[in-house]
Image (cartoon, grey):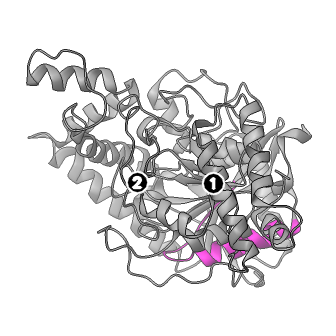
Amino acid sequence: MHTKTIAQLSQGLKDKEFSSVEITQHYLDRINKSDLNAFITVTDELAMQQAQAADDKIASGNGGILTGIPYAHKDIFCTKGVKTSAGSKMLDNFISPYDATVSHNLNQADLVMLGKANMDEFAMGSSNENSFYGEVKNPWNKNKIPGGSSGGSAAAVAGGLSCFATGTDTGGSIRQPASLCGITGLKPTYGRISRYGMIAYASSLDQAGPMTKTAEDAAIVLNAMAGFDEKDSTSAEQDVPDYTANLNDSIKGLTIGLPKEFFSEGLDDAVATEVMNAVKEFESMGATVKEISLPNSAYAIPTYYIVAPCECSSNLSRLDGVRYGYRCNDPKDLEDLYLRSRSEGFGAEVKRRIMIGAYALSAGYYDAYYLKAQKTRHLISDDFKKAFKEVDVIMGPVSPTTAFDLGSVKDSVSMYLADIYTLSANLAGLPGMSIPAGFSNKLPVGLQLIGNYWSESKLLNIAHQFQQQTDWHTKTPEEG
């Protein structure tokens, strides 16, 4: 049952082949036996209540396509009455008094929340080794990382612990773990999905999205997640199309752009081979390929690691031990309260980024660092605008390597390089996807698709057509 897609489970529920209660119990049993550490909180009782309510709704003839489907919710989305920790010690005791808009939208679709998925602390990391709740393991090889920060979400879907999961992508945190775990992950255009109630890391970069088995499933979930939200000032007032409507359109005549900068030094040869094999598959389907250049993409990492830490230092300043979250024991005075609460409550990587951000925003350095990074960000965005005058979609690798060993990367800069191909899309606010495209040494390789603004339907169509011709997305860790 856990190998079925959303579309298959939805049809099975409609045809009375099984109930939501049965599906939910099946997933909960698998979670209980799992050693992947993919969940921070498992909401057994709530899930069974939601499943029963979903079955009642289906029986009355009022069920929708997502009614009764179980999912894992990244623990960065506020969920009323349920712990929302963002993978941190700082929020280990935080029970949200309200629902994030994404949580509300998924509740309205009558979905069943199995629990809150593990993640890098405050979404800062590329390996899911920065969680206060311990590292997540890759279902394909438990000695490998699942990617981050949405590693728990990716591992839950790939490991058959959830039908789909929510994720967030600030610099690749949906696409990179999707690639390393062999699932489909979509980061929509910035502003497509509300950020209200999503604990902020870098406000101008964060974007929520679905992590699923297939592009068809991603389209189904995006229909429920997307939309304008007046509670979020960064939410785009754009109509939400039916993302499933054009999945079966032909891609004959599609022009694919391959950035030469994405295939240079640093890319693993085996990963490059699988990516190019996938591109050849698109050519056999009628697409044409054109080499393009994104000359400023080389500056994506230094630009991102100025902009994001600056924004995180501002966003996390509210966590001071006073109003909510972790509070140190027996503070001597207010300064001691601030100092020890934050020192004890934040992990090493989070503190590192707060300090970088505070430094870059300080008097005398703002112009030299933050302002210059924002100017470079515009140059990166302009490269994409120029490219999309010539091509319909940009393709390339998601990650320079397959999943690496847990604990093998000791320095932060090497870890930051894992996001070299994904960061540019966030800086430009563009939609991007990762879809399974092959294997290297028995580990998944993802193909990245980057589209123009608001082209999620096109990306999903392209991904779906590829998945109609290949079976990489059907492979599971249980097959070895």
* Front residue of 32 and 201: 32
| Residue 448 forms part of the magenta stretch | yes
- In this picture, is 440 found above or below 224? above
Dot 1 amino acid type:
Gln
* Front residue of 238 and 437: 238
Name the magenta segment's main secondary structure. helix
Secondary element at tag 2: loop
Percent coordinates x, y for residue 148 in the rendering: 56, 40
The disc at residue 49 is: 1
Q: Residues within 10 Å of mark 1 (few under 14, many from 20)?
A: few
Distance in Å between CA atoms under marks 1 and 2: 24 Å
Q: Image quarter for residue 259? A: bottom right
| Residue 258 forms part of the magenta stretch | no
- In this picture, is 27 found above or below 463? above
Dot 2 corresponds to which residue? 198
Q: Which quarter of the figure is the C terminus placed in?
A: top right
Residue 263 visible from this viewpoint: no
Q: Where does the magenta region start and end? A: 447-469
Q: Residue at x 11, y 14 (%)?
A: 332
